[in-house]
Structures are given as C-alpha cells and as structure tokens.
C-alpha cells in the first residue's frame, strides 16, 4: 500500500519527561484517521512534531515520499500538510474573508514588483483568490459573515473558520486538533458532515484529534490511541472500543478478558 503520511518512531523529551516516544503512523491517501487518548497523552505534541513546531529527536516523517525532517512550519505547509489548533489562533482584527485570503497566498505566484505595480496578472490572481476563499467559506456556511471581524464570530464559527483557513493552503493532509471543542450537538453533526464533504470534494486525507468519542467512532476508519506518549492500540472503531488497554487508559481500571 502507498502511504501519504509515513511516520517512523518519532520521539521528543522535555527535560526528563518523554512526551512522545516511538510513535509510528502510516496513513493511506484519502483516509480519515483518528488520534485519541486521555488528557496529557501527547496528542497535540504529535501534531507539533508533524508540523515543525517541535523538531523530533528521533525517527523520521515523510509526506508523499518527501522527508519533512528539519523543515520549518511554513515549508511543511507548502509541502501539503496543514493544521488547525486546539486553541483558536485566528487573526481576530481581520475580516473572516481576509483570514482565508492570507492562507490562499501560500500558493500565490505574483512577485513583489507585480504587487506594488498592481499588474493585470496580480489583479487576476487576487480575484481568483477571493473567489476561492468565498467558495470555501460557503461550504461551512460562513459566506454571509465574510466581512465580519473574525473575533466577532461565535465560538463554533471560529472553529469552522480555522478549518477553512487550513483548507485554503491546498493541503494533501489536514490535521484537525479538537475541531468540535465547544460546539453544541447540532454543530457537531454539521461538522461531521463538513469533514466528510471536504474530504471527498478536495481529495483530502484527514488526521483528527477529538475528545468527542461519538464523532470519532462515527467518521474515522482507523484510530490510534496514545497514553503517556506511547501508542497502546490501533485499529478500527469497533476494535478500539473493545480493547482492554484503551478501556483501562480511559477508565483507570484493569479490564480482564473473559
């Protein structure tokens, strides 16, 4: 099988604490994979390792056969790996539209000279960027809010805007860090539909961190479980739900198999 993301035995320690160790993950093109675990298990640290926020001290990371080791976050985004954050990091003073337009510029091709002189090529590309941004916003029902300041959006809408901004970089793989956090049940249902829609419409591969187990079990095809920075299980949703190590990690009690 050809894997889009191939992570082999990455790890990092902070002082004497082994935050993540021997983490291995392979995700096929077009897959929707979940990464779960109790609070403090190391899930967001894994995302930070994959996206260049932290430099892995061991192991290797390849995206589409290309090594991401040592690359800076903007270079990793340009390579096709984008993410959202557990703590929302929008440009609050800017409009909803401008938040997305900025991300679209990662794929922009006009030069500084063309920008300063406002050439016809520059104007055409800016028009195309705005059209793409509005198309992405409409998928998440944010089109009518395009000219609102991002900080004025509801919490759920800010979460959706973060996903739109990540999509605007034209990723091959998108990492979603607790996208349903703070959403009500109806918003979570719509989020699940939107994730499925963008996956198919944009031929995306998705890696999802989420505490809402019903969402994870409903939409993910395979799930990896972390505890204390180590993988304790991987499998289908059904296999994960019945895994004794997973139950022990979440409930704090040993489950013996009958």
Image (cartoon, rainbow, N blue to C red):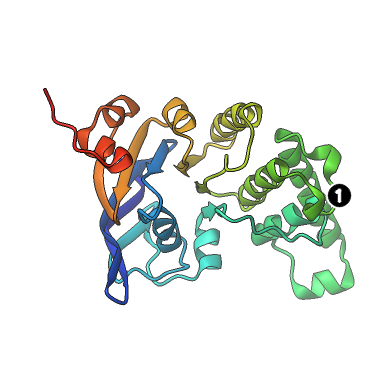
Residue 103 or residue 12, whichever sits in front:
12
Q: Position of residue 24 (x, y in %)?
A: 27, 52
Asked if residue 139 is positioned above or below residue 102 in the image, the reply reads above
Crowding at dot 1, Cα within 10 Å, few <14 / some 14-19 / many 20+, comes out as some
Query: Judging from the image, what secondary structure is the residue with disc 1 in?
Result: loop
Q: How many discs mark residues in the rendered view?
A: 1
User: Which residue does the image show at 38% across and 43% down from the upper left?
Assistant: 36
Which residue ends up furthest to the top in the rendered image? 258
When the figure is inspected, residue 75 is found, relative to residue 38, above or below; the finding is: below
Residue positioned most to the front = 253
| Residue toward you, 193 or 124 | 193
Residue 234 visible somewhere in the drawing: no
Rendered residue at 45%/62% (across/down): 48
Q: Is residue 85 visible?
A: yes
State which quarter of the image contains the N terminus: top left
- Say which quarter of the image contains residue 216: top left
Q: Position of residue 110 (x, y in %)?
A: 74, 65
Q: Position of residue 159 (x, y in %)?
A: 65, 45
Q: Is residue 124 left or right of residue 236?
A: right
The reply, left or right, for residue 124 in relation to residue 73 is right
Give the position of the C terminus as an image quadrant. Answer: top left
């Amino acid at each position: 099988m050809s894997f889009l993301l191939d992570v082999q035995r990455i790890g990092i320690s902070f002082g004497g604490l082994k935050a993540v160790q021997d983490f291995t993950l392979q995700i096929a093109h077009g897959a929707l994979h979940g990464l779960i675990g109790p609070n403090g298990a190391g899930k967001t640290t894994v995302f930070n390792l994959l996206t260049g926020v932290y430099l892995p001290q061991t192991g290797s990371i390849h995206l589409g056969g290309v090594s991401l080791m040592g690359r800076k976050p903007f270079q990793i985004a340009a390579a096709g790996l984008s993410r959202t954050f557990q703590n929302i990091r929008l440009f609050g003073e800017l409009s909803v539209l401008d938040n997305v337009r900025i991300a679209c510029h990662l794929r922009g091709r006009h030069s500084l000279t063309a920008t300063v002189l406002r050439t016809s090529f520059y104007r055409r590309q800016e028009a195309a960027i705005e059209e793409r941004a509005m198309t992405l916003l409409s998928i998440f029902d944010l089109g009518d809010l395009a000219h609102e300041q991002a900080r004025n959006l509801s919490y759920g809408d800010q979460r959706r805007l973060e996903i739109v901004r990540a999509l605007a970089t034209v990723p091959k793989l998108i990492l979603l860090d607790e996208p349903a956090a703070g959403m009500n049940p109806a918003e979570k249902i719509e989020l699940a539909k939107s994730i499925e829609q963008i996956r198919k419409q944009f031929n995306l591969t998705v890696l999802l961190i989420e505490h809402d187990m019903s969402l994870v079990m409903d939409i993910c095809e395979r799930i990896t479980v972390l505890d204390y920075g180590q993988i304790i299980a991987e499998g289908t949703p059904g296999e994960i739900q019945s895994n004794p190590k997973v139950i022990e990690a979440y409930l704090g009690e040993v489950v013996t198999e009958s």
